[in-house]
């Protein structure tokens, strides 16, 4: 079996794509895998983990944390080094120069060049420079590495020269969503990051508007707020119209989602979202509940054929509130949409199938080991 290291200095310890999906899939396939990532301590199971310190800022992350990462990866001596952060591209090029037998895989979670426009800390004169730097990094990964794994087809299109490439979509593990839907009347749910990019205030405004005509409507939120999100939740999560459950253990997410009549995915129309495949929609479908989502063309193209939910204008509170009220007052329709979504997840849109693409790539890259 292949000896594989997944490396990130940016993502959270239990990042859903890295820890819960890709690493667990490769371990289940029998490979020797270690995740090198920011964490409080090393762990032996369920995913073997080498902890990196959490840096004070970006500069320390690039200088100090990457030095620690280099030592960890060198000690593990992998057949395959699978990196998840753009800032690790120079790291991987240097590592490959000194370890010619190691195969390098770059995992493109998002459109790196496109998302530069969404960075609030970049001034107008910094953005063109950052965009050029991002394009150079993507080009280096495209031409230098042994393979590129991308989360969506549009993201993969940014790597036309990759030696090998595959799409591994962020579909849910079907086995994680065994709970049957038990929708509470009038309940909308959202589990995820609680920020203005993800329309936190907008969701609260929508539920307030809906309650004018659907008095029992209420919103259940769970996830990690940023500082602004904490302020908003402290003011408006009153336990009546809005209930905030805090940050959930991933194992508890399916049971919470299953209590919703409608799952919400409202995002700002930013470049890195427009061509994404939102994990939340798949989770709602896996849970057997209807969804209401931002009306982005790529989302509509990808999801509308499944007839599992509705789309709405999430730049207008009134329009979104009307769409949500229409669903919450029609539980039969919600049940039908949820059942259709669950059937699609069972048939094709599950990570059990996506894991096959990842394990096939490993067999190609390390045939002697795999």
Image: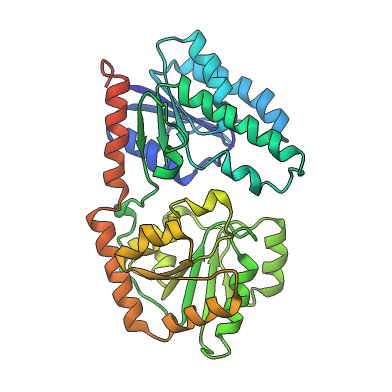
Give the quarter of the figure containing the C terminus: top left
Residue drawn at the location 59% of the way across and 27% of the way down? 136
Observer-nearest residue: 106 or 318? 318
Residue 274, image x and y in percent? 51, 54
Is residue 60 found left or right of 353 in the rendered image?
right
Residue 11, image x and y in percent? 56, 39
Observer-nearest residue: 119 or 14? 119
Above or below, 36 relative to 224: above
Counting the numbered discs, the total is: 0
Residue 41, image x and y in percent? 56, 34
Above or below, 14 relative to 179: above
Above or below, 296 relative to 122: below
Picture quadrant where residue 148 is located: top left
Give the quarter of the figure containing the N terminus: top left
Is residue 176 found left or right of 94 in the rendered image?
left
Residue drawn at the location 68% of the way across and 23% of the way down? 63
Above or below, 8 relative to 339: above
Is residue 125 found left or right of 310 in the rendered image?
right
State whether residue 219 appears in this view: yes
Observer-nearest residue: 340 or 61? 340
Residue drawn at the location 54% of the way across and 91% of the way down? 213
Residue 264, image x and y in percent? 48, 68
> Coloring scheme of the render?
rainbow
State whether residue 1 appears in this view: no
Picture quadrant where residue 18 is located: top left
Residue drawn at the location 73% of the way across and 65% of the way down? 231
């Amino acid at each position: 079996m292949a000896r594989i290291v997944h490396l990130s200095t940016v993502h959270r310890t239990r990042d859903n794509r890295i820890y819960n999906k890709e690493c667990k899939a490769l371990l289940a396939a029998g490979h020797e895998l270690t995740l090198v990532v920011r964490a409080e301590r090393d762990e032996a199971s369920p995913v073997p983990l080498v902890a990196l310190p959490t840096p004070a800022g970006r500069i320390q992350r690039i200088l100090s944390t990457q030095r620690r990462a280099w030592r960890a990866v060198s000690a593990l001596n992998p057949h395959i080094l699978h990196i998840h952060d753009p800032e690790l591209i120079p790291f991987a090029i240097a590592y490959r120069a000194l370890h010619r037998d190691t195969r390098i895989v770059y995992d493109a979670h998002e459109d790196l060049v496109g998302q530069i426009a969404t960075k609030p800390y970049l001034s107008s004169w910094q953005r063109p420079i950052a965009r050029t730097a991002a394009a150079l990094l993507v080009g280096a990964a495209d031409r230098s590495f042994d393979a590129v794994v991308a989360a969506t087809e549009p993201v993969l299109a940014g790597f036309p020269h990759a030696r090998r490439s595959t799409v591994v979509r962020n579909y849910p593990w079907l086995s994680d969503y065994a709970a049957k839907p038990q929708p509470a009347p009038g309940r909308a749910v959202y589990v995820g990051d609680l920020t203005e990019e993800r329309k936190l205030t907008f969701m609260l405004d929508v539920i307030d508007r809906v309650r004018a005509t659907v008095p029992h409507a209420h919103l259940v939120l769970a996830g990690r707020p940023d500082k602004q999100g904490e302020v908003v939740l402290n003011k408006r999560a009153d336990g009546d119209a809005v209930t905030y459950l805090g940050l959930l253990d991933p194992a508890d997410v399916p049971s919470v989602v299953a209590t919703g009549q409608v799952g919400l995915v409202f995002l700002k129309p930013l470049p890195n979202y427009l061509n994404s495949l939102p994990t939340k929609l798949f989770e709602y479908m896996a849970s057997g509940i209807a969804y209401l989502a931002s009306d982005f063309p790529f989302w509509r193209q990808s999801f509308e054929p499944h007839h599992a939910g509705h789309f709405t204008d999430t730049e207008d509170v009134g329009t979104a509130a009307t769409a949500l009220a229409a669903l919450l007052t029609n539980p039969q329709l919600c049940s039908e949409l949820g059942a259709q979504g669950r059937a699609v997840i069972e048939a094709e849109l599950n990570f059990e199938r996506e894991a096959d693409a990842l394990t096939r790539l490993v067999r190609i890259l390390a045939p002697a080991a795999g």
